[in-house]
Image (tube, helix red, strand yellow):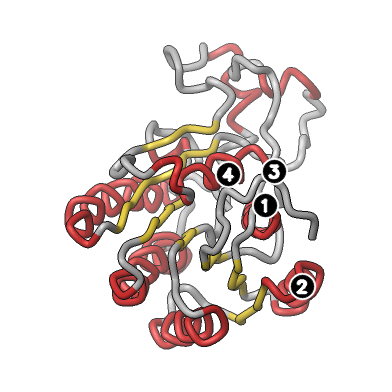
Amino acid sequence: MARTGGRLEGKVAVITGAAKGQGEAEARLFVAEGASVVLTDVLEDRGRIVAKELGDAARFVPHDVGNEQDWALVMSTAVDAFGCVNVLVNNAAVHWLRTIETENVTDFRRMIDVNLVGTFLGIQAAIAPMRAAGGGSIVNISSAAGLVGYALHGAYGATKWGVRGLSRAAAIELGPDRIRVNSVHPGPIKTDMLPPDRAGLGDRRWTGIPLRRAGEPTEVAEMVLFLASDASSFTSGGEFTVDGGSLAGPPTPPATRSATAEGGSNAG
C-alpha cells in the first residue's frame, strides 16, 4: 500500500464493518497514512481479502459487534499484533427502509443490537487500552438520520440518534483520560446500503441535496481520518456531517422529497 502524508504514522486503529463500503475505504486510507489497522466484520471472506491486500499493517478479526466476548478478542489482537490501540472507528451497522407501522420488534431489536449496542460495547472495550496508551480517538459513525427525522427510518434513526447521544456522554466521561469521542453523520453514500434507483429518477434523485449527488465512501473516510489524527487534538464531543449540504437549510419541499427519501441515509 503506497504511503501518502503519514497523518496517522505510528497509530493503531480498530475499524468495524471494514470488509466493504465506508469501513473498507477508512481502512485503506488509514494504512496509506501510516496506521496499523485491525479490520473487523461478519463478512469473513471479504474481510480477509482486504486485510491481505493491505499487507503487514493489517489484521482481520471475524467480529459480531453485539458480542462482548468478540470485542475482547478484537482489542487483544490489536495489542498483541501492534502494541496498543489509539483509534476506534465504530462503523459497523445494518440498515433497511420500513415504516414504523410495518416494522417488527425482532428486527427493531436487531438493529439496536448492531448499531447502538455494538457502538456502546466498542467504546467500553477501547477504554482500557486507550488509557494505557495515554489517550486516543473514538469515531462513531452515526448518520444524517441521527440529526433529523426521515420517513421509513424509524428503527435506523432511533439507533443513530442513540449513537449521537452516547458519543456526547462518552466525550465528557473520557476526556480526562485524553480519549476524544466524536460522531460522523453521513448523508446518502455510494455503498451497498444505498438503495437502488428503482424509480429511474437518475440525477433527480438528489434534488434535495445542494451538491446534487450522493457521496463517495472515500469522502467519509477523509472526515474520519481527520478525527482520528492529531490534527483534531482539541476536538471532542463534536458532530460532523458529510452530507452534500442536505442539512444546511429547511427540509426538502414535498414535491422533491420522494426523489431523495429512497436514498435514505447511509452510515455503514
Mark 2: few, some, or many residues within 10 Å (few <14, many ≥20)?
few
Residue denoted by label 3: 195
Residue type beneath disc 3: Pro
Q: Residue 203 falls in which quadrant of the image?
A: top right
Residue at the (59%, 11%) spot, across then down: 255
Determine whether label 4 and label 1 are within 8 Å by CB.
no
Provide the residue designation for mark 4: 266
* Residue at image coords 60%, 62%: 35
Tell me the SS state at disc 3.
loop
Q: CA distance from mark 4 to mark 1?
A: 19 Å
Question: Is residue 47 depicted above or below 207 in this figure?
Answer: below
Instruction: First in sequence, mark 1 or 2: give its number.
Output: 1
Residue 215 horizontal/vertical position (percent) = 67, 33
- Residue 214 visible (yes or no): yes
Residue type of the residue flagged with mark 1: Leu
Three-letter code for the amino acid on which mark 4 is drawn: Asn
Q: Would residue 109 be visible to someone looking at this image?
A: no
User: What's the CA distance linking mark 1 and mark 2?
Assistant: 13 Å
* Structural distance between the alpha carbons of marks 1 and 3: 25 Å
The residue labelled by disc 1 is 29
